[in-house]
Image: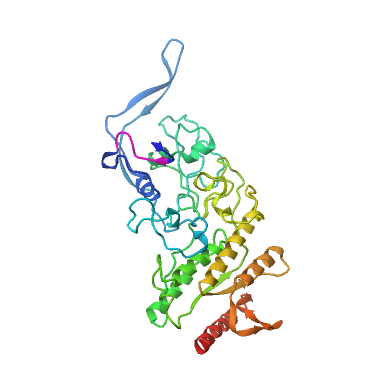
Amino acid sequence: QKINGIWYKNGTGWGTEEGQALTRFSLYRDMKVVTSHERIVGSKRVVCDEYRSNNTCKRSHNEYDYNDTYGPFASWQGCVEVRPYPYNVDDTPASGGPNNTGIGVGDPATMFVPMFAPDEPGNHWKVTQDPDEPNPATYGAANSWWNDDPSSTTGKTRQSNMAKYFMPRPINAPVLATGAGPNYSCTTTPVTPLTDVTTADGLAAIKAAVDLMQPNGNTNVPEGMAWGWRTVSSTAPFTEGRPETERGNDKVVIVLTDGENTYSTVNSDPAGNKSTYAAYGYTGVGYKGTSVTRLFGGTSSDIGQFNYSSGNYTNALNEQMAKLCDHAKAANIMVMTVALDMSSTDAGDKQAMDALKTCSSDSRFRKDPADPSKPAKLFWNATGATLSDNFKEIANELSNLRVVG
């Protein structure tokens, strides 16, 4: 039952869960798939599908009762959505919400919310034992992975109706496309906390984490950098960082990317999402009932609030990145940026390179070769062939910090 925009487990059959609110975590637990489907002996019955004018059966099929057992369909893979502005561009620790969250009462917008990619419009399996049942209706959505609730009629209600997730997935349902499901867009490996690489185990852990990294999905530089900041910070969710007040302690974030910021549009959009589901959610859905989507929160008038083009998405991400960089540097985070295999003659690459250079901190001891009156920017335009040498330069920069600082 939906009350004031929130779904609750109200009605019959909920047992001890009666009245509980549905959450993304509870949905992962509640979605079931049939793992065993055993026909009950002696349960056969004939069902007439079409009658003649004399009331005799013209077409029929056999139906049976089954004993089913169920297992979990999916588990949360660890990805979270971007926090709404301004918490997406700073290091404010999560402070809870109006209810008891275990971490105190504060602004719920500071919380890190698990990603749950909704089932988009479309059906995947038949719902009766009638062999003449029409094939399931599909609508070309990017991430349709469950059957729609039969009461839903429009694309938007097909996607938003929560009742469908409590219909078990049959044992013979078609195999989903790679990546489809509630963890859609969760393509990254878990963040590795600050690790002491002077130990053999620590170095091995870092190398293993790097080996597991694969390029996939959108390029979201600001969110990657935000998590880099959180790992060196002394506040939750990562607490391995030393106190910011400790003398002689430099906190450095190195940002490396091989392309411009992107957020994907869709070819077929039966629910009006305006984008695929990713870290900022859908761009066609306003935040907290407003008309402004989360991606556009806090952006300037240069960003069209109802412009759902990939170019506008890139510009919005660039603005989010610029604010994040300013806030990180103001918090005494040294930001080093590396553009990998980008060309200054390509407009998109050039825009990304300029953003990375602006984001970077000033060197504390090197001067800009083009203007010795200014400090050099901690930005490197690298290629695969030069990357190793570029990181040696970065290491030298850090070594000099220890000498002069």
Residue 37 image position (x, y, % from top left): 33, 40
| As drawn, 259 above or below 126 | below
Quarter of the image where the N terminus is located: top left
Q: Which residues are magenta?
A: 6-13
Residue 7 lies within the magenta run: yes
Residue 134 image point, x, y percent: 50, 31
Query: Residue furthest toward the top?
Result: 54
Which residue: 40% across, 79% down? 196
The quarter holding residue 268 reads top right
The picture places residue 271, in percent across and down from the top left corner, at 55, 41
Whether residue 404 is visible here, answered yes or no, is yes
Residue 340 visible somewhere in the drawing: no
- Identify which residue is drawn at 43% across, 42% down: 173
Q: Residue furthest right?
A: 345
Q: Characterize the magenta stretch by its predominant secondary structure.
A: loop
Q: Is residue 299 left or right of residue 98?
A: right
Judge whether residue 40 is colored magenta: no
* Residue beneath the point at 39% across and 51% down: 74
Could you tell whether 294 is left or right of 107 in the image?
right
- Which one is nearer the viewer's eye here, 107 or 131? 107
Q: Quadrant of residue 104?
A: bottom left
Q: Is residue 130 above or below residue 16?
A: above
Total labels drawn:
0
On screen, residue 94 above or below 239: above
From this view, report whether residue 113 is shown above or below residue 141: below
For this rendering, which residue is in front, 271 or 323?
A: 323
Residue 94 spot, x, y in % from top left: 41, 60
Return the residue nearer the eye: 359 or 277. Answer: 359
